[in-house]
Amino acid sequence: MTNLFLRRRLSRQANRIAYDGLELRRVLTANLPVSVFVDGAGTLIVAADPASTETVVFIRDSDNSTTAIEIQNCQMNASARGPLDDDITCNSSTEVGVSTFTSLRYVGNDFEDNVNLNVTHSFTASMIGNGGNDTLTKNRGRGFYFTSSLIYIFNPDATAGGEVSVYGGEGDDFLQAETAIGGAGDDQLHGNSLDNYLRGNDGNDQIYGYAGQDTYLGEDGNDTLAASADALDGYGTYVGTGRMFGGEGDDIVVGSLGEDFISGGTGHDLLRGDAGYGYDDSTDHRGGNDRIFGGAGNDEIWGVGGDDHIDAGSGDDVVNGSLGNDTIYGFDGDDTLMGGAGDDRIYGGEGDDTILGENDVLIFDSEDTANYVDYLNGSDIINGGPGNDKLYPDNGSSIFSFHQVTYDDVVVGGPGNDEIVAFFGEDLILAGEGNDTFDSNAARFYSTSTPVAIFTVYGGPGDDVLDGGATQDYLFGEAGEDTISGGSFGEDYLRGGPDNDVIVGGGDNDVLIGDDGNDRLRDSSGDDYFSGGNGDDYVSAGQGNDRVLGGEGFDELLGGAGDDHIIGGTEADILNGGSGSDRLFGGLGFDRLAGEAGDDFLYGESGNDTLLGDSGNDFLSGGSERDFLYGGTGNDSMRGGGSVDRMFGNEGDDYMLGESGADVMYGNDGNDLINGGLGADRMLGGNDDDTLIGGLGNDELFGNLGSDFLDGREGADELTGGADPDNFFRVQPADVLIDFTVLDMLGS
């Protein structure tokens, strides 16, 4: 026996209809323009007057069952609460005159409700569940077919089926409608191609909107929100505009291929702007421009296709913008932010972040199998923000093959210890405060074209490590004790900043500037420019024709192989030309200059300098102070300058000019020419046939070994020829000749 109740301003008992099976027990209209009866085929008929605007309420008090409800050929608003065991038909037959029900309500119980609503005409309906686990299925023709465990979508028709609103109440409900509110329990809510409003409320709910401009609210619990069930597998094809709110709990939210608004709320959420991206044999599904908000918790967010705006919120989040020109904000927490393909803007925010500007674009075949990487171009702007960040403008992992590859990146590290890894492209990197690391050597590339890459990196405050790699780099360490490397290739511009920096150039023509601090600059090859700046600097130029400036401080400057130009600076510097024809200028201070191999030019300039020609035919000029000049091997030329200088020719046929000051000059080996110049000079010819000229002043000339030529010139000079036959020339009355013998010759 089943009890149904018609209720409108009459008592419940006065409107009771009792029936069993197909046999009608009683029909009572109770003065209402509504009749309920069973037709000849055994179908329960609900009929209303055509002019009626009444509400019919059905109350069901039995246990679990499955109800089939058929509504045909009528316009109505129907709301259902609970299950029915019977077939109820609203028919437009002229015999009963059904046409205008205002509301049809089904009231159930606390048991599981299973209602099949079969519609063959447009109408608006709603169902309110009671307790228990409810299932409402809205069918129209072959559009939807549902079972308790499977959902098959064949040919949904949004226009002919009308609109349905469903309220699940307590229990684990399965709801299919345009408007569905799950209530308590773990509910499944399914929309359709219309504009759906789906709200899970309490419990771990599953909400699927399908196409249309939908609004999803997961509320409490660990919810799953998606444009369709297929979207969770990454290949959904629905296009709509969704508004999805995860609420509290650990949620999974997947948008449509349209422009979605997604908010994860609190909890550890997985958020995807679109179902997926790929090319297949028939359709190009790229996805829409989504707005995604992670909220609190450790979230995983995927923008997928389109130009997405992603706000990860607080927590340790993982964000992948994937395709499109994305804007990503990590905010608080230790985030991993990946821009993906396209021109992205990435802001790490506070926390120790890892930022990757470029990810792979995968091309799929019809079997959804990764085929190859089509392109990796992107222009990224990356801001790490406060915290210890790792910034990767271009991610080189999972690279199969690619074509012309260029990147144009802007990286802003912000405060904290940042790690920045970049590959090909023209990049601007601002590491900000903290001990930062920049590296462009981490890529694995296979390309038939010549890669083009230019990096500009500003380390900011902190002890930074900047590595330009095989590219043309502009690296600025700025404040902090930085380590800067231009890499093996590319014409690099490397600048340390105000602290003690280590700067390494590489293989091409580089510019290395230490600025302030005690810096160490070196390069292996190339025609490089070095400037130590202020501080006590060490420079090793390596191979190539280099130009080296020590600047202020006590500097050590090494030219290496090649024709180098080295300038010492303001303090006592050490200059070493190395091999090649070098030019060394000591500058201010007590400098030590060594030409080493090659025909070198050494200028002591100001200060008491030491000049060593070493091998080669060298030119040595002491400058204005007391200098020591040593020619070394080769035919050297030396000039003392304006003070008391000491000059040693050593091997070779040397030329010495004392200039002003009381100079001491030793020819040593070789046929030397020694001129005292101004001042009271002391000259020793050495072992071979030397020429000694006293010049102005009271000079001492010693021929020593060999047949020497001694000319005292002006002043009271003392001339000593030595053991071999010597020539004395232009002897003045005041001159004194020592050891003059018959073997010697006297000239005028």
Image (cartoon, grey):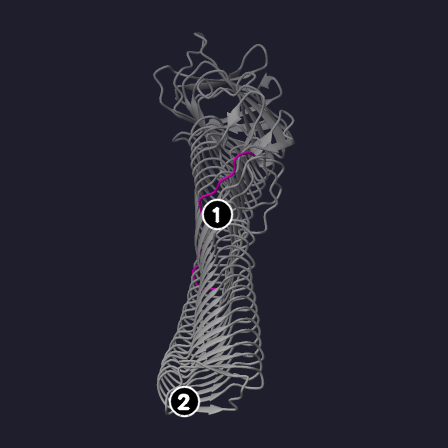
**Residue receiving disc 2:** 717
* Residue 409 inside the magenta-drawn segment: yes
Using the rendered image of the protein, determine whether residue 335 is visible from the camera's viewpoint.
no
- At label 2, counting other C-alpha atoms closer than 10 Å, the crowd grade (few under 14, some 14-19, many 20 or more) is many
Magenta span: chief secondary structure = loop
Q: Do the residues labelled 1 and 2 touch (CB within 8 Å)?
A: no
Residue range corresponding to the magenta coloring = 403-416
Foreground of the two, 212 or 304: 304
Foreground of the two, 440 or 452: 452
Q: Where is residue 512 drawn, in percent x and y?
A: 46, 61
* Residue 742 inside the magenta-drawn segment: no
Q: Which of marks 1 and 2 is in front?
A: 2
Q: Number of labelled discs?
A: 2
Quadrant in the picture for the C terminus: bottom left
- Residue at the spot 37% in from the left edge and 85% down from the top edge: 661
Specify the amino acid type for callout 1: Gly
Residue 559 numbered tag: none
Quadrant in the picture for the N terminus: top right
Q: Where is residue 291 drawn, in percent x and y?
A: 42, 42
Specify the amino acid type for callout 2: Asp
Q: Earlier in the sequence, mark 1 or mark 2?
A: 1
